Image (cartoon, grey):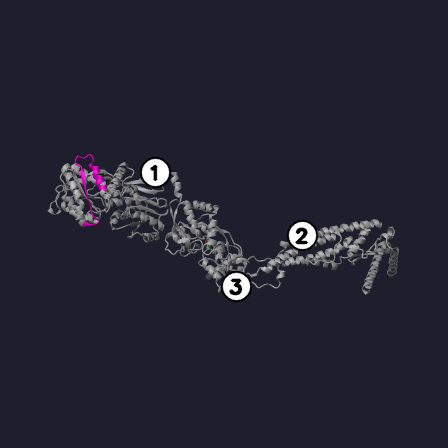
Amino acid sequence: MNVKLKWLPSFIIMFCLFCIRGERTIGAIFDDGSFLYEAAFSVAIDAVSKNEDNPFIANVIKTSPGDILEAEKAMCNLLESSTFAIFGPTIKTTVQHIQNIADFLEIPQIITEPIETQNRNWSAVNLYPHHVAYSKIFADIIVVKGWTDFTIIYDGSEYLPYLDSIFGLQNLIAGEDISITVVQLPDGDDLRSQLQTIKSSGSLNYLVNCGKDKLPQFLEQAQQVGIMSDDHSYIIMDPDFQTIDINPFKHGGSNITGIRFFDPELKDIQDYTSSLNEKLKTLSEGKIENEISKYGLTFKLALVYDSVMLYTSAITAMGLEESANFTCDSGETWTFGATVINYVRTMEIDGLTGTIKFDNEGVRSEIEVDVLEVMAHGFEKVGTWTTEDGYSGSRKNIPAVEQEGSDSMKGKHFIVLTALSAPYGMLRESPKKLEGNERYEGFGIEIIEELAKMNEFNYTFEIQADGVYGSYDDKTRKWNGMMEKIMDGRADFAITDLTITAARQRAVDFTNPFMNLGITILYKKPTKQPPDLFSFISPFSYAVWGYLAGTYVGVSVLLFILGRFAPEEWQNPYPCIQEPETLDNQFTLANSFWFTLGSVLTQGSEIAPIAVSTRMAGSMWWFFTLIMVSSYTANLAAFLTVESKFYAIKSVSDLANNPYGLTYGAKNQGATYGFFKESDNMIYQKMYLYMKNHPDLMTESNEIGLKRVKSDTENYAFLMESTSIEYMVERNCDVAQVGGLLDSKGYGIAMKKNSPYRQPMSESILQLQEQGKITRMKDKWWKEKRGGGACTDDDTSSGDAQALVLANVGGVFIVLAAGSGLAVVCAFIEMTINVWMISKRAKVPFKDEMIAELKFIFSFSGDVKPVRHRESSGSGSKGSKKEEDKEDDDVESTREDERLDAPTPHSERSSHSHHTLHSRRQSNAVQMAKMRKYSRQFSNMTK
Ligand code: GLU
């Protein structure tokens, strides 16, 4: 009822117009559920009626999509209100139903759908190209491209006829073994699982036959699963390929080819498009605007125009005035029906979609299309295809700028392989269910994010589930893990703690390193030791203690000798006697040792040096003791406050010697293991053999290594890379790095050998480093995120006190040695001056006096020195005459005694007379003086 009411006004209007002006009505049934066909039909009718005396008029009935009963009623209504033909409908089932009625009533039915007409010799005229001709276009393109292995991806059974010629390709390419895989896309929006299957089949070439509506979704999801890289090629069969938004896919690296039936830039097309837009706006009462100019004119809408052109030209050419005008159940047929249909089939016009003509079978088998390819600047016509001549390429040379740009990463999509290895790649913690790249975070993930921003590329992360980074297997002669995937092109980049090694560099390309590191040991923190009773020895190393003792003895002996040299040190024992017979020296051997000991122990002694030389030596010693004692005190404080620790191992050689039954290992198939394997160092070779013979000690990941190190049941050390150790010791306070780095290397992003992306990626990494971004990222992921900084306060006492070694205090020994040397020189000068003065005063030869003096000095005969040339005996009395005489008498009597006691041969006596006499006198005088001294001391004591 509603439908009838809806039609009523248009019937009345048309009827009146027909009566008044003799206009020719063309009926149409459209069930597409939109205004598009109706608008296209109306615009076309308006266009063909312009300047016509007998204009055509459109009678459009819109029915519910796929409702055959409604469509049937519409047809009968059109017939009752007179029509020259029925255009439409659009949905396959309805088309076929209306076709049956049209056949029966001999009414021409004009369709523009890729639908097989049931009886092509009868009433239906289909302007959609015939499937055999259509599929031939693509078969030829495949031959030109030389595909011998490809996958046909189609959307539904209605697309299968359009693959006819493709399946016949085997016959076209002689001698080639063609492998074709056919895959149907699933219903619904998620095509990813099917695309994943296609990807894992290893196929790289795809012939895609699906509708324009599904195509963007298909391409987007293909990009997401990673089959739109440089290695992949697509041929799109849909004629509306040029109307999809190609921008997201044009930089992806894939070769995408398609066809078009018309150039959207042509004036006719643009005029039609703008009229269509106007019409749409009117029909939809302003709700639909510019839809066609936004997406472009579709092939079917162009066909609607062409079909109207074709049919109205036939009617006009035939001069037909009488339309079909009867009821469906009248049993009548249209008298001119068969004639019109036959006439239309013989016609040939130039339409928007090319030349429209039908073959003997009544189908449109002669077609002409442009072949397009997607370039960085958009679509580019690379050739044409005609039924007659097949494919002919017309590709212009690609401009140089475009070629350079083809290496650029802009807009391309890449598969980035990573591993779940903290902190390089980790699963994001979130209460929400995350999808795609959102699921991952970490240092490596952030670097890729930054690089993608800088180079404007898209990426999808893929996880290396087994965590194997890749090593070369000598037996299979193949790489495994991430390396294999990169080499096979299954992923474009790999980022994680992937070490750049010489072997890997031979197989793939790496960017500049984004991080530097070296191999070292992860082990439990050293255990604390009980305080040492003898820790007071610790401040100095044993060597320093030894040097100190040696220096003490040396300086003491030196002082003793200097004392003997220095005249000033020989002092009058009786200050009241002006000219003593003997002089005393305070620097006896015992006193010298006591003096130096007193200053070392900072206690001093009553002995004070008098001569310049002894003072010089003494002050040097004081300086020496000052520095040594201060250093000792300072270092002792450190030793007493710092807890001493027990280190089971301190370096890798300790580990190799394995003193406490330690076990050790590294990550299986990793660069660390590879380092030991390749090294020619004896220790490392020994360690490699150990690890090789103990596969149970090798781990699948660094995390497992850490667990084993921490385990109480195992005494395990893990060889690992310093950056990863840094991350772990930030969070696990019971483990620490032991020893230094065994080597120096870096982590890089791996990609296929000779990849054009190596240069831009390396450049961007350097930029990130120069901007300090990588350092900031490292601080964030190492020290802040995921429990970073947990062990920062833990290690306040970690600095061990170290015994001072000679290198620390060597300078002060040198100063002391230099000072002592100077003192010796001084002593010698003092002694020489003194001897010279005496020899002058006593008028004895300098040489004799010097020899006598030296003899005395080196006789080391006690601390009393007789005065050899007293002034009174030479140049007049100054002291007590009485006492002097007495002493002289003593000396003389002694001299006489000696003469008697020891008779000397005359000759000898005569030659040595002076010296012998002199020395005897000296020794006797010394004896006498001593005796007097002791008797005085004795009497003092007894008083
Ligand atoms: N970074 C290493 C690699 O690239 C894995 C860890 C290791 O071997 O210590 O293989």
Instruction: Identify whether 602 is placed above or below 405.
Output: below
Label 2 sits on what residue type?
Answer: Ile
Instruction: Identify whether 701 is placed above or below 341.
Output: below
Q: Residue 182 shows which numbered tag? A: none
* Segment colored magenta: 39-68
Displayed quadrant of residue 393: top left
| Dot 2 or dot 3, earlier in sequence | 3
Label 1 sits on what residue type?
Answer: Lys
Q: Which residue is mark 3?
A: 661
Residue drawn at (39%, 41%), measured in percent from left and top? 405
Q: Position of residue 479 (x, y in %)?
A: 42, 53
Label 1 packing within 10 angstroms: few (<14), some (14-19), many (20+)? few
Q: Which residue is mark 2?
A: 814
| Nearest to viewer (mark 2 / mark 1) | 2
How many numbered marks are there? 3
Q: Is residue 614 visible?
A: yes
| Dot 3 or dot 1, earlier in sequence | 1
Mark 3: secondary structure: loop
Q: Residue 396 shows which numbered tag? A: 1
Disc 2 to disc 3: CB gap under 8 Å:
no
Label 3 packing within 10 angstroms: few (<14), some (14-19), many (20+)? few
Q: Is mark 3 within 8 Å of ligand 1?
A: no
